[in-house]
Amino acid sequence: MLLAGDIGGTKTVLGVFTAGKGPHAPLVQATFPSAGYPSLEAIVREFLARAEQRMERAVFGVAGPVVAGRVTVTNLPWMLDEAQLRAELSMSSVRLINDLTALAYAVPHLAPDDLATLNEGQPVEGGAIAIVAPGTGLGEAYLVWDGRRYSPCASEGGHADYAPATLGEVELLRYLLERVEHVSFEYVCSGSGLPNIYAYLRDSGRAAEPGWLSAQLAAAEDPTPVIVNTALDRREGCEICVATLDTFVSILGSEAGNLALKVLATGGVYLGGGIPPRILPALGDGRFMEAFRRKGRMAGLLADVPVHVILHPGATLLGAALCGLESV
């Protein structure tokens, strides 16, 4: 019996798995609002009490860098420690891994129906695989072939310096540097980053903000869904939202190409996180792949790299379960 979890700033998803039924079939699963609880331990206790289960082992995929068995959860006031969790939950084994590492575990086990393909490419057997996942933040990871199977490798590449690829993006960077000390790719290529692009387009006068949209954004708890939904509904003809999403897609394509070059991802690039499935029409209009391939003499190499969008809604939980069950 294994307890697996996907621990994020917005929600925590827990599931109970067994080697017999495998990682695709949790015996029980539940989702909790992370911010509604004082700690992960509180969520786990409630979940196990509801499920009437007692666990000896757990693997948690956590949004944040895991170092020496400890991690501070991004966008939550939680500091998780493997030893402390073992003691508090009376378990013999607790393992913390980055949530993108968990997602990476899942990638080789995804079915064709779990994916939408942006570029068929020509995958190289045993070639490295890159994962770029824009959600609330921007996660990155990659997998390398060790001669027997793919091994996930953690990364915090989403926090690397944002590198503009066009003159318009240079002006975006200039605008942001006047307001914050460090502009990372996450600052412009995530759910929290979309409003930053929007603000630049509005404040620079590159696109006008209609009054009805200004009122909607002022009333919204989170402006990102308003911007994205308005952009996707092209019948509205909202220039500023369309321009915001187009810029986001180009930046995502550029950074996905960057990671593909850095790890030589001839095995493919996978887009995870909550945003790519939501904006599939925008990703498929050619803008993403144009930015992905815009790497000078390396354009031909990247044209052969397969690019897929992960549609599986529970891929991170699946990966955490795979990580735990493979050691059984």
Image (cartoon, rainbow, N blue to C red):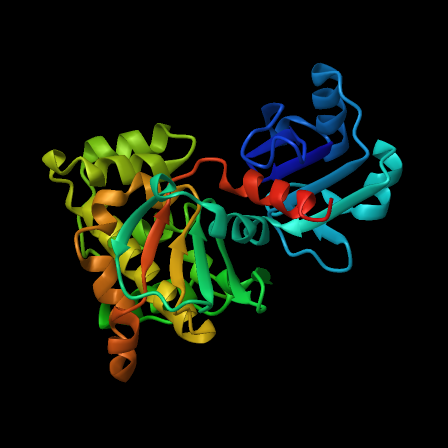
In the displayed structure image, the side of residue 114 where residue 20 appears, left or right: right
Q: Hey, which quadrant is residue 125 in on the image?
A: bottom left
23 or 184: nearer the viewer: 23
Residue at 73%, 28% (x, y): give it. 44
233 or 306: nearer the viewer: 306
Task: Tell me where residue 112 appears, x and y as whole percent.
Answer: 35, 44
Asked if residue 133 can be seen in this view, the reply is yes
The number of discs equals: 0
Vertical arrangement, residue 51 with respect to residue 75, above or below: above
290 or 120: nearer the viewer: 120
Residue at 50%, 41% (x, y): give it. 315
Q: Quadrant of the N terminus?
A: top right
Q: Quadrant of the C terminus?
A: top right
Q: Hey, which quadrant is residue 93 in on the image?
A: top right
Task: Tell me where residue 218 appears, x and y as whole percent.
Answer: 35, 32
Residue at 58%, 54% (x, y): give it. 101
In the displayed structure image, the side of residue 297 where residue 20 appears, left or right: right
Task: Tell me where residue 325 appears, x and y as whole percent.
Answer: 67, 42
Asked if residue 189 can be seen in this view, the reply is no
In the displayed structure image, the side of residue 180 where residue 166 appears, left or right: left
Task: Tell me where residue 242 appears, x and y as whole percent.
Answer: 19, 46
Vertical arrangement, residue 98 with respect to residue 174, above or below: above
